[in-house]
Amino acid sequence: MIYTSILPPASTPLEKALEQAAASVLDFATPVRDVWSPAHCPAGHLPWLAWGLAISHWKTGWTIERKRAAVADAIPYHRRKGTRQAVAEVLTDHHPAFQIVEWHEANPRRTPHTFEVRAPAAEISADFLTVAKAEEIIADIAVAKPARAHFDFVQNLDLTSGMFMAAAGMSGTVARSDYGAIHDE
């Protein structure tokens, strides 16, 4: 880095030495404007940038591209946070088969400001939906949902089956006679 002094020409040798020492300590390889840019931020600084933008659903196992996308979407996400759309996006990130049923859509109607997240067992493999994964999904929903809303996480299995009825009949007469011997004495 080219060092340019910001001190006036009449500064003392001590001031110049302190400026040189501070310049070597504060010499950053990455300009601050790049640290705040999701596209240019060094990969090692992305978790700090996510923390600075209050990304609560950050996963360390994500790819760098996914992390950059989450940081780039942080401000629009906070605008959507607390809406059905935010909950739907969180669920889609985990698996597209999840369904949301709000209180007014249920039959019979449920308590106001409640909803149900359904995980159809026929479409989601048992290997995917483990206890740890379910807890992770529930935690992500709790962050994205409206603060006043309560929810149930339900794994359901809808089965359909045809019912067949058959009958058989037979007519006939059954006569029974008991014959016994009578003895005279």
Image: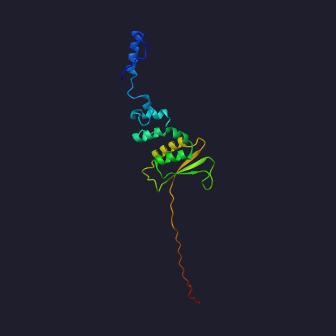
- 46 in relation to 161, above or below: above
Q: Position of residue 105 (x, y in %)?
A: 60, 53
- 173 in relation to 51, above or below: below
Q: Position of residue 140 (x, y in %)?
A: 50, 42
* Left or right, 178 with reference to 24: right
Res 62 visible: no
Image quarter (top left, top right, bottom left or bottom right) of the N terminus: top left
Q: Position of residue 99 (x, y in %)?
A: 52, 52
Question: What is the residue that sits farthest to the front in this orientation?
Answer: 9
- 100 in relation to 52, above or below: below
Pick the residue in front: 9 or 133.
Answer: 9
* Left or right, 155 with reference to 9: right
Pick the residue in front: 174 or 115.
Answer: 115
Which residue shows up at 39% across the image and 33% down it? Answer: 44
Which residue shows up at 39% across the image and 21% down it? Answer: 25
Image quarter (top left, top right, bottom left or bottom right) of the C terminus: bottom right
Pick the residue in front: 102 or 63.
Answer: 63
* Left or right, 112 with reference to 136: right
Which residue shows up at 47% across the image and 33% down it? Answer: 51
Pick the residue in front: 108 or 95.
Answer: 95
Res 80 visible: yes
Q: According to the image, what is the colour scheme of the structure?
A: rainbow
Q: Position of residue 61 (x, y in %)?
A: 41, 40
Question: What is the residue that sits farthest to the left in this orientation?
Answer: 1
